[in-house]
């Protein structure tokens, strides 16, 4: 019997590559995105988040075997939306769908984090995120909009680490982990590769030990494993799939 997985951000990039991989393995996938998906919602809004949960309940009344919180944006001119989607939308996805994961004997959840979590962020906005204060986080990030993406991904990584070991997650046999990609060739990053100055900055902020950036399918391979592995011991990990960026930037951290 096929397992059922729900993926946000399923219409492009890493989410799409993961959906294609799971479907090729015979699994059932419920895609979520702004368009071209089974559930079309804006996870930057409270209405969209509520509708996601309601639609997921309708489409998978017997529960979900796995959830990927993969929807995200990176836009310098949209700092509020970046925080709203990347952090609050991801957390609402995972927390809101946890009851559906609990209906299955072995629930798995994955969040797409980022190596950007290693870069400087806005502490006020970060604290507001972790305090579940969306209005406060959006107000704070407006003062330092250039840090929105980094702040959103660090907040998500910290929330994941703290939540994964809680009774309602690991204690209920729902294993929550994260993937932190480096720079990936996706529609979201495509504009960067045409700008020589951005390529220079990327090389400084994301030093790599290997040649060439990854394609979405390479990250999907790891997500596939985290959504379907059979063990019960891997929990609360943020796995850097980044060509060596984390090891170069933090050689003494493990």
Image (cartoon, grey):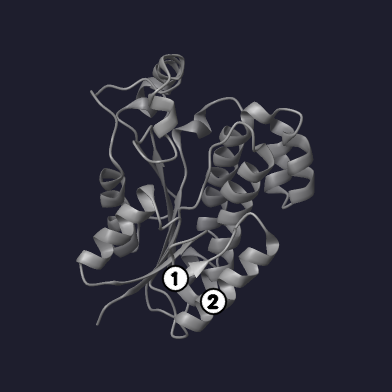
Mark 1 crowdedness (10 Å alpha carbons): few <14, some 14-19, many ≥20: some
Relative side of 224 to 189, left or right: left
| Disc 2 to disc 1: CB gap under 8 Å | yes
Q: Which residue is drawn at 50% across and 57% down?
A: 164
Mark closest to the chain's N terminus, 2 or 1: 1
Using the rendered image of the protein, determine whether residue 254 is visible from the camera's viewpoint.
no
Relative side of 148 to 64, left or right: right
The answer to whether residue 107 is above or below residue 111 is below
| Near-viewer residue (141 or 133) | 141
The dot on residue 55 is 2
Q: Which residue is drawn at 53% across and 37% down?
A: 74
Q: Name the residue under label 1.
A: 38
In the rendered image, which quarter is residue 230 located in?
A: bottom left
Name the secondary structure under disc 2: helix
Q: Which residue is drawn at 57% across and 72% down?
A: 53
- Residue 150 location, x and y as percent? 57, 33
| Near-viewer residue (107 or 86) | 86
Using the rendered image of the protein, determine whether residue 83 is visible from the camera's viewpoint.
yes
- Residue 139 location, x and y as percent? 79, 39
- Residue 171 location, x and y as percent? 49, 68
Tell me the quarter of the image containing the N terminus.
bottom left
| Near-viewer residue (181 or 197) | 197
Q: Residue at x 47, y 43 (%)?
A: 113
Q: How far apart are the alpha carbons under marks 2 and 1?
A: 9 Å
The dot on residue 131 is none
């Amino acid at each position: 019997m096929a397992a059922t997985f729900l993926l946000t951000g399923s219409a492009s990039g890493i989410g799409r590559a993961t959906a294609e991989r799971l479907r090729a393995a015979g699994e059932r996938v419920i895609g979520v995105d702004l368009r071209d998906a089974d559930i079309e919602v804006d996870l930057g809004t409270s209405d969209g988040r509520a509708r996601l949960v309601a639609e997921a309940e309708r489409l998978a009344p017997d529960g979900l075997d796995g959830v990927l919180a993969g929807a995200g944006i990176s836009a310098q001119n949209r700092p509020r939306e970046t925080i709203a989607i990347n952090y609050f939308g991801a957390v609402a996805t995972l927390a809101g769908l946890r009851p559906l994961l609990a209906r299955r004997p072995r629930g798995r959840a994955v969040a797409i984090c980022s190596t950007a979590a290693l870069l400087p962020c806005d502490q006020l906005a970060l604290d507001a995120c972790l305090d579940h204060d969306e209005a406060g986080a959006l107000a704070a990030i407006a003062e330092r909009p250039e840090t929105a993406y980094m702040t959103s991904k660090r907040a998500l990584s910290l929330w994941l680490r703290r939540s994964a070991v809680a009774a309602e997650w690991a204690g209920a046999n729902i294993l929550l982990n994260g993937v932190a990609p480096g720079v990936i060739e996706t529609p979201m990053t495509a504009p960067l590769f045409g700008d020589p100055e951005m390529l220079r900055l990327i090389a400084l902020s994301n030093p790599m030990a290997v040649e060439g950036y990854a394609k979405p399918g390479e990250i999907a391979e790891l997500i596939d494993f985290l959504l379907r592995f059979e063990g019960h011991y891997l929990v609360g990990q943020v796995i850097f799939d980044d060509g060596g960026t984390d090891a170069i930037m933090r050689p003494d951290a493990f």
